[in-house]
């Protein structure tokens, strides 16, 4: 009798399971990795690199120019983009930078193309390259007109870029055509028509290098314009003869104002150098500083590799 009841109970349980099957447990959801942090260019100098940069400038007899505010200089090693090592002198001092702020026009054009506001035709592509590679003023003015003068000023101050910040001493600014016409809007802090700080120029290169400035396609346009410099003075005069060295570069010259900037790659290392000067010999200063700054960056890379092996 007991055996019969057990069989009947099992039969009833089987019937219930057929009508109302037990839920099948779902596999656990895969845990997605947190998004990688956006690389940020530090403002804090690396103590060793800062000390060596200052020594280098003193050896070149240019410390007085730093103290007088006529020389701004920045070196940042970005081989590891998430841990940049920076050294600077007057890097947050805004100065007239002649044609160097054409990089801001290049940036504005890239964003406008990316947003679909500006069609990328052959004429625009050629002007974007020539205004950077050969510093063509007419080309820069045509691109600026197509981008929109007010649009570019707003873009440079946009919260996600902040290449110009009035509360932080200024930065990159374009408030005048590259033509013999009056400025349409000078920067509100220093009253400059074309200005820059070494730090904000370095941020431009750092963001472009880390893919946080624009999308891949428009970044490729910017890389093309900035590569293969067509004017061989200042930084290029000193570094262009080094076999295997690659650089993206933009300079500027007007009267006593001389500026240069570059993102340099060499033997697996990357660094950014920026120099702004206000002196008739400023171009010579920058040419004389470029090679020692390159050697400093390479020496720091060798030291980092040696320490990593310990």
Image (tube, grey):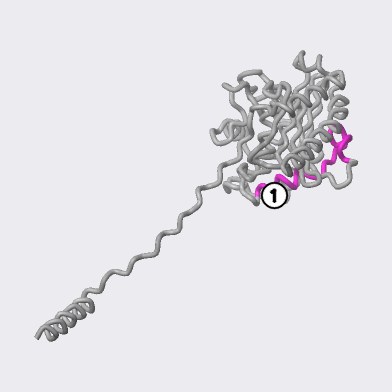
As drawn, 283 above or below 16:
above
Determine the residue positioned at 78% across, 26% down. Answer: 53
Reply yes or no: does residue 7 show up in magenta.
no
Disc 1 is placed on an element classified as helix
Q: Quadrant of residue 14?
A: bottom left
In this view, 246 is above or below 140: below
Residue 291 falls left or right of residue 45: right
> Which residue corresponds to the image point at 78% horizontal and 28% vertical from the top-left?
259
Q: Is residue 273 visible?
A: yes
- Magenta highlight range: 218-240
| Quadrant containing the C terminus in the rendered view | top right
| Pick the front one: 163 or 43 | 43
Q: Residue furthest right?
A: 241
Residue at the spot of label 1: 220
Look at the magenta stretch and give its main secondary structure. helix
Label 1, residues with CA under 10 Å away: few <14, some 14-19, many ≥20: some
């Amino acid at each position: 009798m007991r055996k019969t009841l057990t069989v009947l109970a099992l039969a009833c349980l089987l019937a219930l399971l057929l009508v109302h099957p037990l839920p099948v447990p779902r596999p656990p959801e895969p845990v997605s990795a947190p998004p990688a942090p956006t690389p940020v260019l530090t403002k804090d100098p690396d103590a060793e690199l800062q000390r060596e940069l200052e020594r280098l400038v003193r050896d070149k007899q240019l410390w007085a120019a730093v103290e007088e505010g006529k020389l701004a200089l920045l070196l940042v090693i970005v081989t590891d983009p998430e841990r940049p090592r920076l050294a600077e002198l007057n890097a947050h001092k805004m100065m007239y930078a002649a044609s160097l702020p054409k990089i801001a026009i290049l940036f504005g054009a890239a964003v406008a193309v990316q947003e679909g506001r500006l069609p990328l035709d052959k004429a625009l592509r050629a002007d974007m390259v020539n205004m950077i590679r050969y510093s063509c003023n007419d080309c820069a003015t045509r691109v600026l007109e197509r981008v929109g003068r007010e649009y570019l000023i707003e873009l440079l101050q946009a919260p996600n870029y902040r290449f110009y910040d009035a509360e932080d001493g200024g930065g990159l600014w374009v408030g005048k055509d590259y033509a013999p016409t009056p400025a349409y809007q000078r920067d509100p802090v220093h009253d400059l028509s074309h200005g820059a700080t070494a730090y904000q120029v370095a941020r431009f290169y750092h963001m472009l290098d880390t893919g946080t400035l624009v999308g891949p396609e428009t970044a490729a346009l910017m890389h093309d314009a900035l590569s293969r410099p067509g004017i061989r003075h200042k930084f290029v005069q000193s570094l262009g003869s080094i076999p295997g060295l690659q650089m993206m570069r933009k300079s500027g010259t007007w009267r006593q104002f001389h500026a240069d900037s570059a993102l340099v790659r060499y033997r697996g290392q990357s660094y950014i150098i920026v120099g702004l000067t206000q002196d008739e010999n400023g171009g010579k200063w920058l040419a004389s500083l470029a090679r020692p700054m390159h050697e400093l960056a390479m020496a720091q890379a060798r030291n980092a590799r040696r320490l990593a092996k310990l």
